[in-house]
Amino acid sequence: MFHSLCKAFSVIPEVHILTVEPGVQKPMHQLDSLKRALAQCDATLLVAPEWDGILLRLTQLAESMHKRLLCSPSAAIAISSNKQVCYDRWRQMGLPTPRTFLWHKEVHKTPSFDLSPPLVLKPNCGAGGESTEKVNDIESLDSLVVGNKGFLLQEYIEGEALSVSCLVRDGEVIPITLNRQFMEENGFSCDSVQVLKNDAREAELFALAQAACLAVPHLRGLVGIDLVYGDDGPVLMEINARVTLAFPAMCPEMQSNVVRFLLS
């Protein structure tokens, strides 16, 4: 994804790229490198995971340095990275979501929810399937929950993992691709993505993605909506206010259109 973004931006003559590549430095050194890079840039596109508030904090850093964002501001990320808040907003809009309960290990000593296994246990603020587990036995919950962070328990939805990539600006949502997600063995982490063409469900899922995005004010840039298409139709799972694995799967022309939209 990182290299696909660099390549797409590099073909625009008036754009000069300065990057802080992930995974090559210790976190503290990465932060120092990012600060130095931001000081030299007019605009920034931040790509980072939501867990532990990483994306939110980096975005707030760029905002504190008064940099133009080519992605969503912290006001949007604070909402989109909180899954429970998103589910509540989607339900208020009448959009399909899995039944979900917020679970705190230290508060909920005894399960008191109207759900039966199999269930999904996931961090309320997380990304990439990190610390997400399928629960087949309620008694195993305590052993699966690590620390005192808020976790979500939700009904397990069987179906096809899909996503919709959208371009968002000033309350306008433009769906651009419907994508199939190929999941890793655990069933919750996306390994790769395929852009689907001429899929009969496209109009339905584009409309659902538009509505899902409109539930989060201030979204901007490339946004991904994750969903599962089950026997009863589509169910919204997550919203990613950042570039996702769908970007490298797009054709070069689409990638070029995306980065030009971000710059406009």
Image: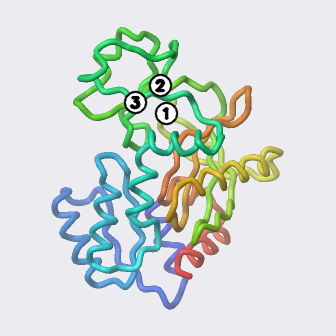
Q: Which mark is residue 188?
A: 1
Looking at the picture, which amino acid does disc 2 mark?
Val
**Position in image of residue 197 (x %, y %):** 77, 53
Q: Quadrant of residue 37?
A: bottom left
Element under label 1?
A: loop
How much space separates mark 1 and mark 2, taking CA atoms?
10 Å
Amino acid carrying mark 1 in the image: Phe
Q: Which mark is residue 120?
A: 2
Q: Residue at x 18, y 69 (%)?
A: 32
First in sequence, mark 3 or 1: give its number.
Answer: 3
Between 53 and 93, the one nearer to me in the picture: 93
Inspect the image, locate mark 3, and give the three-letter code of the amino acid beneath it: Leu
Q: Secondary structure at mark 3?
A: strand
Q: Nearer the observer, disc 2 or disc 3? A: 3
Q: Is disc 1 in contact with disc 2, using a CB cutoff of under 8 Å? A: yes
- Mark-to-mark CA distance, 2 and 3: 12 Å
Q: CA distance from mark 3 to mark 1?
A: 19 Å
- Residue at 41% across, 49% down: 81
**Mark 3, residue position:** 102
